[in-house]
Amino acid sequence: MIHLIAWSVALVWIIPFLGVFSTATRPASEVTFGWWQVSPYHPTLDNFIKALTQPTYSISKGYLNSLIIAVPGTLVPLFVAALAGYGFSRFSFPMRDYIFLAIVLIMSVPAQMVAIPVFQIMVNANLVDNQLSLVLLHTAWGLPWIILFMRNFFSALPLEVEEAARVDGASDFRIFFRIVLPMAIPAFASAGILQFMWVWNDFFFALILIFNPDKMPATVLVPHLASGQYTTDWGVLTAGSILVLLIPLALYVVLQKYYIRGMIGWTIKG
Amino acid sequence: MGETGAVERRGLRTFTLFGRRRGGFRLVGRFGPRTRKAAVRSVFFAPALLFLMFLVLYPVLQTVYISFLSPTGAPTLGNYRAVLSDPETINPNLSWPPPLGTLIHNALWAGIHLPISLLFGLWMALILREVKGSSIVKSAIFLGMVTPMIVGGVILRFLFETGPGIVPSFFEAIGVHSLAISWLNYRETALLGLIFGSVWLWTGFSLIVYSAGLTTIPQDYFEAAKIDGTPPFRMFFRITLPLLRPMTLVIITMTLLWELKIFDIVYAAAGPTGGTRGSVDVLSLQMFNYFVQGSYNLAAAVATLLTLLTLIATVFLFRRMVRS
């Protein structure tokens, strides 16, 4: 009985995705009476090709732009936050815990709260319509929780190795780069996958900083796929949605262990 | 912290003594290495602080600042007065078909979405302990959390629109014609449609956190209680629920933050203006529209109000966590 309930919930939860898949992989004429009509079913990639090669808002370009933003937008904050997180876990200085608390509190601030000044900064720096603006912004925005995450990770590491190295005269930097960083690779995986997804999935920051369709990340292009002349071309829209969803989904499937660990570590320890 | 601190202090003291013994450079001996060390160590924090100062702290303060300025630059409380008395924020005519105002919409979102996703996630986490292949069920429910919210919004529109949507067709099939409509086009149904739809997207969060929490409860507790003949519901309220308290707090806070910040879903599902006559408009979208129109001061006031709400939710979590 419990099995039946659990599996039917899973089924209900998956139905929207089935619908999207069914609509995206068939010609529009076959889904006129609902995507759940499964005969005839002529699989086609036309919708995907249309979404990828759409003249102004092509998802293939969006893909590239998203990667240009998300890869450095993940690696830079990971490194910067690892440094700071290590500092918070190992060095004591006045007001340390208050500064740390303030940084953690930043996590709750909504993106809208920085939108206007950030936009003005980027206009002054001539970085509007430049993906660098998003890399910088996502770095700053990802830092608080990655610092928290890395600090918790470093605090749980045994001190002995580092102390031994310190006795041998190794500097703080040497210890950090030679001993601590290699040990932190699993933590980087967990934090990195969450940060990458956050940047890839971001919509708001890209919406206010990128106006040139050639520079837009994939998420910002998605709503544009919908604007047909009179009716929505659901085939192209669902195909585009699948394409944008594919990357985070693939990451989740492949790195599920790290993803969940990052998620739980971030929330429960947070 | 205590242990690290002790190591630090010991390290520093030997260093200072060493400097003194070499003689002569007393000042260097006492301050030099310490200052040098502090300088080296501040390098660990410098990049992070730079990013946070320029792209978080300064913008936040600047937003607060301009929220108290009139468009001409004079200090004023007028933006807040204008925003709070605007029917777009709180509709004085609070009767059912929305728009009820962005603030009320966000509150409704929290009032409906939070309990449903929390309790449903808890319930699923509990029953999934005894289900074979539970990881597949969990993954299915968790899909919504992986989905970019902009895509989530597109899918919600897809679900609720007559034609492609299975929801109107379902109601058509069971004969409820009043709901066999494009939900998002009607003020009566749009907001509820999006709220219920967002349960679909977000339940995975509470499910995963509760599932992880349940694995941390030692089985002995349940076995001991079972031997004592404790009825299951009592076991749940006396053992399971209290031990899950930290998870509950985290889920409540994160869910509240998510509901307050909700933007992409509404934008994708109902368009940048927030649906028919703003029937699904929310605070973040209201801020965005002021921003697009160039009404920066009003936009800043909305953003500040929104941030105030998220801070209240976060402080609630902190205080509860410190207490327990």
Image (cartoon, coloured by chain):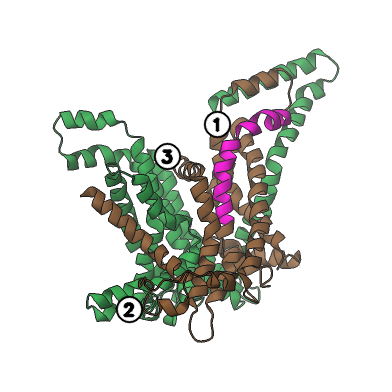
Chain colours: A brown, B green
Q: Are marks 3 and 2 in contact (CB under 8 Å)?
A: no
Residue at 61% of width from left, 68% of height from top? A59
Q: Give the range drawn in magenta.
A: A172-199
Residue type (three-letter) at the residue carrying disc 1: Ser
Residue type (three-letter) at the residue carrying disc 3: Val
Earlier-in-chain disc, 3 versus 2: 2
Q: Are marks 1 and 3 on the same chain?
A: no
What mark, if any, has residue A155 been given in the picture? Answer: 1
Front-lying residue, A219 or A39: A39
Q: Find residue A194 and report its horizontal and vertical position in percent.
A: 54, 49
Q: Do the residues labelled 2 and 1 touch (CB within 8 Å)?
A: no
Front-lying residue, B166 or B10: B166
Horizontal arrangement in the rendering, residue B271 relative to residue A124 (left or right)? left
What mark, if any, has residue B188 been given in the picture? Answer: 2
Chain to which mark 3 belongs: B
Horizontal arrangement in the rendering, residue A168 relative to residue A247 (left or right)? right
Q: Tell me if residue B93 can be seen.
A: no
Mark 3 sits on what residue?
A: B322
- Report the quarter where the N terminus of chain B lies: top right
Q: Do labels 3 and 2 share a chain?
A: yes
Q: In this view, does A118 lie above or below A233?
A: above
Please tell me whether residue B275 belongs to the stretch shown in magenta: no
How packed mark 3 is, by other alpha carbons closer than 10 Å (few <14, some 14-19, many 20 or more), is few
Locate residue B134: give its quadrant. Answer: top left
Q: In this view, does B298 lie above or below A89?
A: below
Give the Cα distance between marks 2 and 1.
52 Å
Q: Do labels 2 and 1 share a chain?
A: no
Residue type (three-letter) at the residue carrying disc 2: Glu
Callout count: 3
Give the Cα distance between marks 1 and 3.
19 Å
Residue at 69% of width from left, 70% of height from top? A214
Please tell me whether residue A177 belongs to the stretch shown in magenta: yes
